[in-house]
Image (cartoon, rainbow, N blue to C red):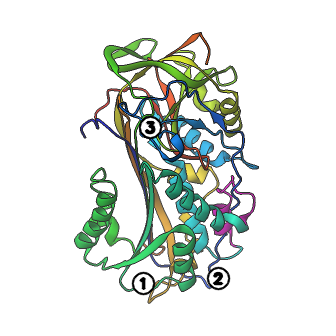
Amino acid sequence: MGMISRILAGLLLAVILLAATTTTTEANSIPTTVTTPQGVFETRTDKVPSLSGTGTALPGGSYDDIDTFVPFRSDSHDPFSWHLLKTVLQDGSTAGKNVILSPFSVKLVLALLAEAAGAGTQTQRELANTQTDIRSQNNVREFYRKTLNSFKKENQVHDTLSVRTKLFTDSFIETQQKFTATLKHFYDSEVEAVDFTKADAAAATINNWAKNITEGRLQQIVTPDSVQSSVMLLTNLIYFNGLWRRQFATTFQGPFFRTKDSQSRAEYMEQTDFFYYTNSEKLRAQILRLPYKGKNSMFVLLPYAVDGIHELAKTLENDELKGAQWAMEEVKVKVTLPKFHFEFQQNLKETLRSLGVREIFENTASLPGLTRGADVAGNVKVTDILQKAGIVVNEKGTEAYAATVVEIENKFGGSTIIEEFNVNRPFVFFIEEESTGNIMFAGKVHNPVSQL
């Protein structure tokens, strides 16, 4: 995939493949509270560009590149997203590798599965426990309805973020009417019948849907074989596309220290400007916020030590990161950041099992909301949850994309001091939608010159 000269884009797709099983428990949806962000921090406005520059005049005399930093404040925290990321980062299979995933997409598809779960079942309890930033289970629906609406409202000016969900079902499947209505009203999701017996055509339909939404970034999210072994596919796609508020003008070649004893050449981009920045002694890392136009920002966590990323991965916690965000101050920073681009794919089944989501993978799974039709009622379980992701970062922005596939089959089958922020060693990053506090993408970089 070539470098994108003007955009920063991110994409995540979750696909849940479903098949038949037998339970008599009725489906129940776990209905979220959204708290209002407080403590708006406005950045310096003494350097607002003229109309001849990149700024565009908006009604009221403001400019579209004036940055307003809102550290999201909530009555509850989101440890699940960070536990998910930490587990993947510390997995032996990802040691020394670049990683990118979308915690929000995983949480969203688990919430949808919880809607289909039997009321009061172990399946529903385990799925509900993943929604850790929502105070009451009865508010899950409202949380996602407001969150998805907020994404549309806050990102419509720059068209930076799109979240789409669709349930593809085999032509003989009839989903529960209540479940279908719930998907539409609260999760902005649709249901489409496809003939899974014609596996090639069905896979093409699903892949084309994802390809169109992601502007061709994802060419294939399912194969004919995966379609043939399923009766339903629940897909969630997140596409992020934006521009740095402050684009990098200078680029140069330099060493990137992958370990104390190993280095490679990387193409760096550099600028000196005012950014929100802090040092965290608890995390043993510098933290920098790089804002995009709109309501999204990338946070870069740079360990003090060359080999410090391993310790940083162990100490990542929601509370620590939120505390660091509130400790940030706007100072002048010389930022040296490598361009990087890579892809990552991971089966999240064992990761989720280790985080307490187990029943959906067992023959005892209760997902009656998904199952109406001959030979299907109650006979559904999840076989795998896969995620494929990629990211491209350059001087104009970043392009990121990811796909999560959940396979379900038949059970019976401002200072004068200039801070230095030189990212010349492995680091952690995350992209946050700041109006809601959701972590859209997160990962780590060990080798910025990995090829797509």
Of the 4 image quadrants, the one containing the C terminus is: top left
Secondary structure state at the residue bearing disc 2: loop
Residue labelled with disc 3: 99
Look at the image and give the residue range highlighted in magenta: 121-137
Of the 4 image quadrants, the one containing the N terminus is: top left
Q: CA distance from mark 1 to mark 3?
A: 36 Å
Is any atom of residue 407 visible in this view? no
Residue 129 forms part of the magenta stretch: yes
Q: With respect to residue 85, does 276 lie above or below?
A: above
- Horizontal side of 108 relative to 136 (left or right) equals left
Foreground label between 1 and 2: 1
Secondary structure state at the residue bearing disc 3: strand
Q: Position of residue 109 (x, y in %)?
A: 52, 61
Residue labelled with disc 1: 173
Sequence order check, earlier mark of 1 and 2: 2
Q: Position of residue 86 (x, y in %)?
A: 58, 38
Residue labelled with disc 2: 25
Q: Residue furthest bottom?
A: 374
Amino acid type assigned to the residue bearing label 3 in the image: Val
Amino acid type assigned to the residue bearing label 2 in the image: Thr
Sequence order check, earlier mark of 3 and 2: 2
